[in-house]
Image (cartoon, coloured by chain):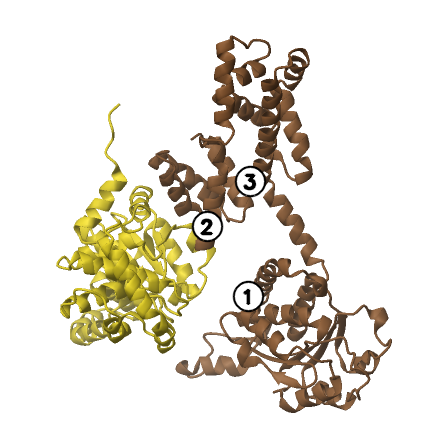
Chain colours: A brown, B yellow
């Protein structure tokens, strides 16, 4: 196996989601040279050992490997039929004309495959990115193989075998183009899809996209977590910490050998979230909970309440190792009925542990179905908490219309921002962690 | 064309002689690790023989095995080296009488300090160094097998500390300088997937995933461990376990549990599996109360099926 095709394989694997670094690429080349091609299984296992670093990645890699080497496997379905006819053709002494026509009439399957592979290389089939390019690529490959000559031959010589051969070639070229798309087009189209998903309204996400979105959410949360976990103490340069210095130098009778400077400890926030899980807000609440859960150690302590009519403490339920399943269970169990912000806020103010280190995040549209809004309960929460942030899935223009009590709640929130997509969610949480630092 | 001897098969055979039946990917990983001088990171469920593998390698190559068991809060002084404080203190006390007259001759503070400097290095020499597994592994003259067990239980800081060792086979001790291995040790790291390991560590390793074995493989493993076991019983055991693993259990029985169970059944002079016998000995296979009660209703069927399939004489699924 040549070096260039090995590199192409690794590129395809990268597109499929296996993370392969440059150092690993070099190692893969070295290891492949050491093991040799063998029967393919050893090579596959070798590359999987060097490049794929988890059970999931190994599975992905094996899929790509078998797809990559698919055309070199024998026994394509159409082969026998063509060969029979080809054998007949030879008996008649047919053939001649263009190379392609001769190969079809002779049933030279190996020759055709070779011509197709050559055409694919010449047309740079690996550069394909989007499915809309498939037809054009297939057509270009056929042109390069000498389609024009073959068509002229068919016009002159109405041998049905040539026509069938042409149909077969068309199908094969298309299959080859599609295979290349699946191998090499994945990277770009995945990136595009991810871009779209991040900007899609979460309430309107189809269940099919949900799993993807969940993994995307976790990745985003991890990124935020590393950004905010780096510094625990920020030094105030130059200000001497007199008490600390004396204590530290007690062993030398208080003679200050080692100085200590003042530092501000970066507080890890205590978060308490209060999520509306009625109707349209439910999906967004699920993602917020998943996001916060994935933040891990950046948040010191995460309390979670959900409500439709009454506030329900789900903190312990959320601590389960499989957060996604836990959240789905919470939504299914408590997510019926219409929301009543008044009673829920009053219950939340009573039950939640809110102190001056706590950031309270409320997620909801503020539509209490004309029940008493209990602004006093929110005021109580805002007074006890360090800060109160309200995320609203509605566009600001709609706040205050119909049964929305947003304008009455707004004065008590340090921040009030619309939050409909995953991107906005990320920005909101990022802001939350920054606010806490100030 | 002459057929070159297959080095990978040779590795598998060598391990087989020590009683460890290695699948081809395992042998391949070891072959690569030896030639590329890279550590192997072994992942897989508990009890599939991750730790056992390094023992087998050490026995096969005839090299000593150094083992570092990771746990939370493991630091350099436990993993790498420590000064023998007690010994240092004791020696200074004993040598006090000797040092005093030597310093007494020196006129003034400066010369005395200079004279003392000559001794201080004496107390931070190899004589007072307590090597822990990592340092001991580097100092083996013929090389060795170094097993870093359950790396996922250690802290992330320790993982970062390991990088120098894994890449350069060297460690730096401030008082002594860099200690480099004369013969690089063959390093194996194991992980149960308690937490996701860092990318930097993974990049430096070959990643080997050992899953639960196929029935044919498992039969070979059990037979290697318990040579006296009757073939019919062995087939029944392996097929039964295979069926049990298809159930929805919290902790699937692994190879070590299969071996324990087979040993127990041979001690009981069992010839055939029966539902009652399985029920009585189930606590060897399943370690959770919930799993035992979940498996109960399926036991009779599984035992019957295993017995029937074992008697057909068909080869076990590979």
Residue at 50% in and 39% down:
A67
Q: Would you place residue A22 above or below residue A37 in this image?
A: below
Sort mark 3 into few (<14), some (14-19) or many (20+) by Cα contacts within 10 Å. many
Q: Quadrant of residue A220?
A: bottom right
The lab-note entry on whether marks 3 and 2 share a chain reads: yes
Q: CA distance from mark 3 to mark 1?
A: 38 Å
Q: Which mark is residue A59?
A: 2
Query: Horizontal and vertical percent for residue B215?
Result: 29, 55
SS at mark 3? Answer: helix
Query: Horizontal and vertical percent for residue B19?
Result: 18, 54
Residue A222 in sight from this viewpoint: yes
Residue at 60% in and 20% down:
A145
Q: CA distance from mark 3 to mark 2?
A: 15 Å
Q: Quadrant of residue A221?
A: bottom right
SS at mark 1? Answer: loop
Q: CA distance from mark 1 to mark 2?
A: 33 Å
User: Could you tell me if the residues under marks 3 and 1 are in contact, i.e. CB atoms within 8 Å?
Assistant: no
Mark 3 and mark 1 lie on one chain; the one further toward the N terminus is 3
Sort mark 1 into few (<14), some (14-19) or many (20+) by Cα contacts within 10 Å. few
The residue at which mark 3 appears reads as A183
Disc number lying in front (3 or 1)? 3
Which residue is nearer to you in this view: A13 or B125?
A: A13
Q: Would you place residue B279 above or below residue A176 in this image?
A: below
The lab-note entry on whether marks 1 and 2 share a chain reads: yes
The residue at which mark 1 appears reads as A230
Q: What is the quadrant of the N terminus of chain B in the image? A: top left
- Which chain is indicated by disc 3? A
User: Could you tell me if the residues under marks 3 and 2 are in contact, i.e. CB atoms within 8 Å?
Assistant: no
Mark 1 and mark 2 lie on one chain; the one further toward the N terminus is 2
Which residue is nearer to you in this view: B203 or B157?
A: B203
Residue B51 in sight from this viewpoint: no
């Amino acid at each position: 196996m040549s070096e260039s095709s090995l590199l192409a394989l690794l590129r395809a694997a990268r597109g499929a989601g296996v993370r392969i670094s440059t150092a690993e690429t070099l190692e893969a080349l070295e290891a492949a040279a050491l093991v040799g091609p063998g029967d393919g299984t050893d090579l596959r296992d070798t590359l999987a050992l060097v490049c794929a670093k988890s059970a999931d990645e190994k599975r992905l890699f094996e899929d790509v490997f078998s797809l990559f080497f698919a055309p070199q496997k024998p026994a394509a379905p159409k082969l026998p039929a063509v060969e029979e006819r080809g054998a007949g053709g030879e008996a008649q002494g047919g053939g001649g004309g263009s190379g392609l026509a001769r190969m079809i009439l002779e049933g030279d399957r190996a020759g055709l495959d070779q011509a197709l592979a050559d055409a694919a290389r010449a047309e740079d089939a690996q550069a394909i990115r989007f499915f809309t390019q498939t037809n054009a690529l297939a057509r270009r490959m056929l042109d390069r193989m000498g389609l024009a000559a073959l068509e002229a031959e068919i016009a002159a010589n109405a041998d049905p075998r040539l026509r069938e051969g042409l149909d077969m070639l068309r199908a094969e070229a298309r299959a080859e183009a599609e295979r290349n798309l699946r191998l090499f087009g994945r990277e770009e189209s995945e990136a595009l899809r991810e871009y779209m998903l991040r900007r899609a309204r979460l309430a309107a996400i189809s269940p099919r996209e949900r799993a993807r979105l969940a993994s995307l959410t976790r990745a985003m949360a991890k990124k935020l977590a590393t950004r905010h976990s780096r510094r625990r103490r920020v030094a105030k340069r130059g200000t001497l910490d007199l008490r600390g210095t004396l204590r530290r130098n007690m062993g030398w009778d208080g003679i200050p050998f080692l100085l200590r400077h003042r530092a501000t400890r970066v507080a890890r926030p205590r978060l308490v979230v209060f999520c509306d899980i009625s109707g349209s807000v439910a999906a967004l609440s699920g993602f917020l909970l998943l996001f916060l859960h994935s933040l891990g150690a950046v948040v010191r302590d995460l309390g979670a309440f959900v409500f439709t009519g009454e506030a329900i403490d789900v903190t312990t339920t959320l601590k389960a190792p499989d957060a996604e399943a836990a959240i789905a269970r919470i939504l299914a169990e408590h997510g019926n009925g219409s929301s009543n912000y008044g009673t829920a806020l009053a219950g939340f103010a009573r039950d939640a542990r809110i102190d001056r280190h706590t950031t309270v995040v409320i997620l909801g549209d503020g539509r209490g179905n004309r029940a008493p809004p209990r602004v006093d309960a929110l005021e109580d929460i805002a007074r006890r908490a360090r800060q109160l942030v309200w995320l609203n899935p509605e566009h600001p223009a709609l706040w205050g219309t119909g049964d929305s009590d947003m304008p009455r709640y707004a004065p008590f929130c340090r921040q009030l921002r619309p939050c409909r997509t995953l991107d906005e969610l990320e920005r909101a949480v990022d802001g939350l962690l920054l606010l806490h630092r100030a | 064309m002459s057929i070159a001897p297959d080095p990978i098969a040779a590795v598998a055979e060598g391990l087989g002689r020590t009683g460890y039946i290695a699948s081809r990917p395992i042998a391949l990983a070891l072959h690569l690790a030896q030639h590329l001088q890279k550590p192997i990171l072994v992942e897989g469920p508990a009890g599939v023989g991750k730790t056992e593998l390094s023992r087998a390698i050490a026995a096969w190559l005839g090299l000593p095995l150094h083992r570092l068991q990771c746990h939370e809060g493991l630091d350099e002084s436990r993993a790498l080296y420590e000064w023998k404080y007690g010994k240092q203190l004791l020696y200074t006390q004993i040598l006090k009488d000797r040092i005093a007259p030597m310093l007494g001759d020196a006129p003034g503070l400066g010369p005395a300090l200079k004279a003392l400097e000559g001794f201080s290095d004496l107390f931070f020499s190899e004589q007072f160094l307590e090597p822990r597994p990592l340092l001991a592994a580097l100092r083996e003259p013929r090389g060795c097998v170094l097993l870093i067990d359950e790396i996922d239980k250690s802290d992330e800081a320790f993982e970062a500390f390991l990088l120098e060792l894994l890449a350069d086979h060297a460690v730096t001790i401030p008082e002594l300088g860099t200690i480099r291995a004369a013969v690089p040790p063959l390093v194996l790291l194991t992980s149960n997937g308690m937490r996701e390991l860092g990318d930097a560590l993974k990049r430096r390793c070959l990643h080997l995933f050992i899953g639960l074995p196929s029935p044919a493989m498992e039969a070979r493993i059990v037979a290697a461990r318990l040579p006296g076991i009757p073939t019919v019983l062995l087939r029944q055991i392996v097929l039964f376990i295979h069926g049990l693993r298809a159930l929805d259990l919290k902790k699937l029985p692994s190879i070590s549990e299969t071996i324990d169970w087979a040993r127990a059944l041979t001690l009981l002079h069992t010839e055939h599996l029966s539902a009652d016998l399985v029920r009585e000995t189930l606590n060897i296979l399943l370690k959770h109360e919930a799993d035992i009660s979940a498996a109960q209703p399926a036991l009779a069927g599984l035992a019957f099926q295993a017995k029937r399939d074992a008697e057909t004489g068909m080869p076990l699924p590979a």
